[in-house]
Amino acid sequence: MGKPVVAVIGRPNVGKSTLFNKIVGSRVSIVEDTPGVTRDRIYAESEWSGIPFVLIDTGGIEPDSDDIILSQMRVQTEIAVETADVIVFIVDGKSGLTAADREIGEMLFKTGRDVILVVNKVDSPKLPDDFYDFYELGLGEPIPVSAVNMLNLGDLLDMIVSQFPKEDEDSLEDDDIKISVIGRPNVGKSSLVNAMVGQNRVIVSNIAGTTRDSIDTPFEKDGHRYTLIDTAGIRRKNKITEDIERYSIIRAIASIERSDVCVLMIDAQDGVTEQDKKIGGIAHEAGKGIIVAVNKWDLIEKDSHTMSKFEKEIANELSFMPYAPMIFISAKSGQRLTNVLDLSREVAEQRKMRIPTGQLNALIADATLTKQPPSDKGKKLKIYYVSQVGIEPPLFMFKVNKRELMHFSYSRYLENKIREAYGFKGTSIKFVFREKLEKEQ
């Protein structure tokens, strides 16, 4: 299904963010020598040996509790165990084994999960005298690394990738459609799950933030099998005061990665907010199928133009995903809820669609005749051929003479032509442009 999730945990100031940035390859997290400074983006996609994965930096959130270290590491451990495929526990090789390390190690040991124990800040091949103290944690052989100097990072990544879950035949043949219900707190996600399943499987409350776990609900309807994933509500950063609320974002990210289709719930009374855009952006960047469900539609005063007006406003606000269909629902009254499942099934099928290479090249040839490719300084873009090289999401590779001649506007034009002919409703489609070598021309 989705990319494996790797969680980096440990007490503050052991180098979690530095390791995160080195693996990702860019300075994504803020790094300072003060405990509790990581407030920037906490997840990013990376890859090793051609295997993609999602890396989560769990460090540096300052909870309200006076006992910052204890409450933080408990939450980190809880989230990592619940959501991550691989847990990387980092300790500080310079300060040696601490009481806080022992506390985290004890919690991890009790879970029975496999853990990769990393001793950071080992800046030379010679191990520090107290290195072997870390064996006391009972978590296996410690791996010495230096995130700053990138010492032994390759060996660490090899070990991480080796622990990714293997897809067995059952999972490959699994025809369940996995649907993540995503959105801000209190927009009605749990109510939607309960209404579609037909029983109260998730606690429903009008207090924002009730759902803090991602809860999977498998069920069957009209001969089709589904799994609904009710994700924790994602709050605006300036409203997150509890560390556990902050970490619910991690659960949502992991849930999105496991899904085929994401139902982005919008509150009809609020319209599209900045946070709605950010949440939709996570699903869009992950290449998932997306449906925009406008909830609480029964509470809106309507005339013959109301829905059309809402559709235009939402399309404008979510312009980065024009492919996402909209549906106006009421989780409370049950209005159009069956349509959500029908639409999810249609979107899931669209993500798996393949276009024969002959048809695709004929379509692109016609498109380039209708609208000539761009040129720059007398050099004109040439598209030699195109083929679909992937699904979920659909991925197309174009062989061209010069990548830089492919302007964004012309790429969008070609995407629109493909969509006009084949649909791809509810899913992003990705383009890759490769230059044709001289010997190939």
Image: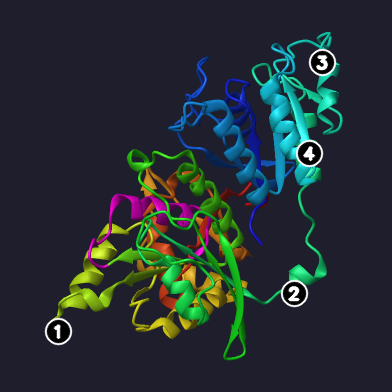
User: Which one is closest to the eye, mark 2 or mark 3?
Assistant: 3
Helix, strand or loop at mark 2? helix
Marked residue nearer the N-terminal end (3 or 1): 3
Amino acid type, mark 4: Phe
Tell me if label 2 and label 4 are in contact, CB under 8 Å.
no
Helix, strand or loop at mark 3? helix
- The residue that disc 4 covers is 109
Q: Nearer the viewer, residue 388 or 429?
A: 429
Q: Residue furthest bottom?
A: 222
> How far apart are the alpha carbons under marks 4 and 3?
19 Å
Crowding at mark 2 (Cα within 10 Å: few <14, some 14-19, many 20+) = few
Helix, strand or loop at mark 1? loop
Q: Where residue 372 sits in the image (x, y, percent)?
A: 37, 60
Q: Residue at x 13, y 82 (%)?
A: 303
Instruction: Report the span colored magenta.
Output: 268-289
Marked residue nearer the N-terminal end (2 or 3): 3
Question: Where, by quadrant of the figure, is residue 130 drawn?
Answer: top right
